[in-house]
Image (cartoon, rainbow, N blue to C red):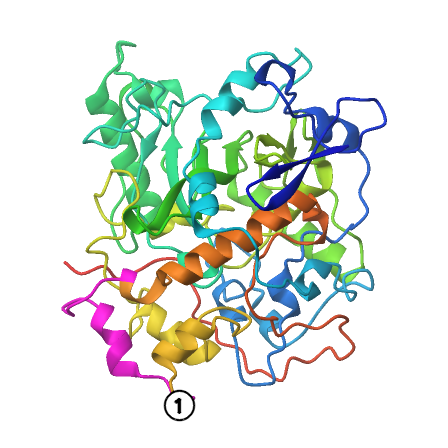
Amino acid sequence: MRRRRLGSLLVAVCCGTASCSGSCAGDAAEFDPLFVARASIGKIVNREAVVPAMCYTRTDGLSNPCYVCHTDSRLPNAMHDFELQEQYSFSDVARENRWTNLFADRAPSKTTDAEILEWVRADNYAPLQEAMRGVPADYGAWRPDVDLGAGFDADGFAKDGSGWRAYRYKPFPGTFWPASGNVGDAAIRLPEAFRRDAGGERSRAIYKANLAILELAIARLGVELPETYTGAAASVAVERFLYPAGTEFLHTVRYLDPDAPDFRARRMKEVRYLKKMRWLDRWAMQRAYEKELDEKDEGVLPVFTGTPLTGVNNAFGWRLTGFIEDADGRLRLQTDEEHRFCMGCHSNLGVTVDSTFSFARKVPGEWRFQSFEGMPDSPSAGANSPEYLIYFQRVRGGDEFRSNREILERFFPKGELLEASVRRAAAGGDRDIRFLILPSRNRALQLDKVYRELVAEQRFDLGRDTFLTPPRVFRRIREESTGLKAFRDGQLWLDWPE
């Protein structure tokens, strides 16, 4: 391993020798995005990497961020895991908090604002596409196949003709807010049959119709559904809260750029991909949930099939592939263990809709690249108050760990929530959700710098969350009770204004 300097930041770079444990960097022709992942296959240290850092939060019997994930689920999701709000119901292995990056003492970074802005404004996605063209034939997982540089048209379709379609959605509360350090966007793609008419010809109108049907089936409550999709997919039945086999999702996680719309930087921290490889009918899905619950009761540690080179599979038919930065900022395939971190949220949570989050939170009819502009803090379906307001009330802060001092100072100036101020972002108010979830310029740049240091260390196995002040978390779970009373109303669906 050799070192080189980016401004004032010293970063690790793979020297290319057989003994090097870092990822291969250097010239584009020498970069192998599979290098680290290939060497990691079968090497799982943290068998409970599916338990994320926020599950170790100190609730003090008062702060409940757990309700957003663990809830009274809706069929065909049969997890009904709301009791996890009340208990740290961990295996013996998971009781030890292995996300030790949470406890690192990170002094103020010496990286200048100009240096970090130069970093976050560089493109690391196009180089990944170029590098993937040269990977060996034994790689069978997803290859990034959309030209993000070309962008999306007015209907949300990728201009490169790849079939991907972007959509607007309301960010999931807490970790997924830009105020916590990340900004994301998402796109969906349906199989070829859903993009063709009954005669087999490509048809944008048919594709739009099928995506609209899917939106009704996944994201809208209390609406009537057609029995089948249309065009060449007319033989495929529409199932409420289930995606058809072959559905794909693309999700990018980006740095913050305070001068860009929604603070969305060009540089990506991660590129995440999901594909529904197998169709499970409702009986098979119930059996999968029962098996998950039985194994948890028996103390069986999570097991996932597949490898980074094939994609990693959950029990509900989905295959996941993820890319993350190497020490030199190039996107590399995640390791075996790093993939399992992602599976923690895309497997057996009570709140998910067919193992997914964002599409159920889609703005009605909005098919375009993600934007927060004009997006109100709409209530969860059936709730009487805006969703983010309820989150602030129940968490008593702006993230799972109550470590975001900026939100505490802005909305909890004397320890009490300024409800009227938060309501300004609700429907009919004079602000939108950006008022609640975007950080200040200074905080955004500091979060970028801290994360860049994590990237240089390449110890994502110890955590990939970034904090400017120490989070309230346990190093080890000793008492099972959280001291909380469970809420059973957490859900993804929203009551959007007419």
Relative vertical location of residue 246 with respect to residue 463 in this rendering, above or below: above
| Quadrant of the rendered image containing residue 134 | top right
At x 50%, y 66%, the residue is: 72
Q: Which residue is mark 1?
A: 414
Tell me the crowding category of disc 1: few under 14, some 14 to 19, or many 20 or more residues within 10 angstroms, Cα based: few
In-image side of 159 versus 241 (left or right): left
Residue 304 location, x and y as percent?
A: 71, 40
Relative vertical location of residue 304 with respect to residue 64 in this rendering, above or below: above
Q: Nearer the viewer, residue 323 or 358?
A: 323
Q: Examine the rendering and report whether any part of residue 27 can be seen.
A: yes
Whether residue 413 is in magenta: the answer is no
Q: Which residues are magenta?
A: 414-434
Residue 400 location, x and y as percent?
A: 53, 69
Whether residue 424 is in magenta: the answer is yes
In the rendered image, the quadrant that contains the N terminus is: top right
In-image side of 57 versus 266 (left or right): right
Q: Nearer the viewer, residue 13 or 298?
A: 13
Q: Nearer the viewer, residue 117 or 329?
A: 117
In-image side of 441 versus 296 (left or right): left
